Amino acid sequence: MKKLLSLIMMTALLFSGCNGKELNQKMIVLGMGIDFSEENYLVTAVYINTESADGKEKYQTKFGRGKTITQAVNNIATQNGLEVMYSHMSFILFGKTVCQHGLNDTLQFFSGYYQCRPSADILVCNHSAKNILAAKKITPEQINRLAQSHTVTGVNRTLPFYRFYADILNPSVSACTSLITQKNDDVNSQGVAVFHDDTFAYSLNDEETLGLLLVSENPSSEVIPITESHKSFSLSDKKTDFSVWWENNTLYCDVTVSATVSFYEYEENPQLLEKSVEKKLQKLVQNTLKKSLQHGDDIFYLTKKLRQKNKQVYYSIKDWQSVLKDTVFTVHCHVSVR
């Protein structure tokens, strides 16, 4: 961590030579939280404390309020006279209130400002972003670890800004990204938040998130239990075949997941559990597909596959929600035991 901080500060120092500003005259933002209250945006900025001589306080937080995101951000700069730098910002955390209000104006600000990183992780919390980022025990590194924890837990799916915003703008796709929760000074990853247009709609729990990842991503370290046999397993070499077609004014999709299985507990005859594993994987994918399609949401990018296959049909559809709710799908799973 010390090496990372040193690298960031050295980079900022190099840039400072271009405009004559010293390092301690810059506010190097590592992460930002957005809330909405009383028709105002509340912005929380977490930044490197460049004025700390003893290194005890690595980070500081500042809060800004305004009718627009630009006003709120400018309000932060007026509090200490520092030049705000967004080029090192690694995450944006949206609070519950701004997700209910709608993210369009906020996303426009971050997409339009040249310093903001398109690769910054987008996260959603079910409470206040300010409360999470202001907690003394919570650091930017911890938020970053949660954002990328799908490689460890297999139960979240964090999108970078450019992908999340592209999904928000796409009329046939529903954007979704990792949901985190706070209890006292602890934060945890807890599934995925799904949006209708630019507004939070509902969340996927851990198992539903894993069902999403089994199709759309490649989780590498998930531990999946088989309840009836008191066994658990992990997957490797996962492959997904996803077929989508249009027939009789109905959208059809066929999903096939194949993988290699490794059991954590000793099993004398692991081949006997193959069917149980396949049944478990099939259920995970089916439940997530069913839930999202019942809401008229496409979080699996079915519509993108339809567009690749049949542009004429894709562009002729005006009511995607009705089409998705009527989608017919099948799920197949095949595994081999290592």
Image (cartoon, grey):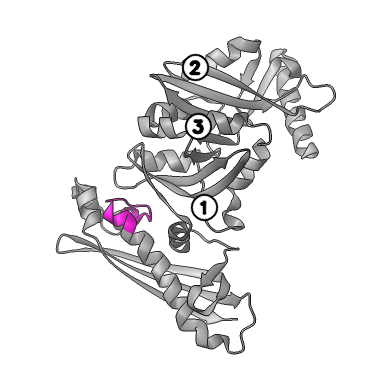
The residue that mark 1 highlights is 156
The residue that mark 3 highlights is 128
Q: CA distance from mark 3 to mark 1?
A: 20 Å
Over which residues does the magenta segment extend? 291-304
Q: Amino acid at mark 3?
A: Ser
Quadrant occupied by the C terminus: bottom right
Q: Secondary structure at mark 1?
A: loop
Q: Secondary structure at mark 3?
A: loop
Residue that appears at 47% across and 27% down? 35
Residue that appears at 57% across and 36% down? 91
Residue that appears at 24% across and 52% down? 314
The residue that mark 2 highlights is 65
Q: Of the numbered discs in the image, which one, if any, rests on residue 125?
A: none
Along the line of sight, the residue nearer the viewer: 121 or 45 = 45
Q: CA distance from mark 2 to mark 1?
A: 31 Å
Q: Amino acid at mark 1?
A: Asn
Q: Secondary structure at mark 2?
A: strand
Magenta stretch encompasses residue 300: yes
Q: CA distance from mark 2 to mark 3?
A: 14 Å
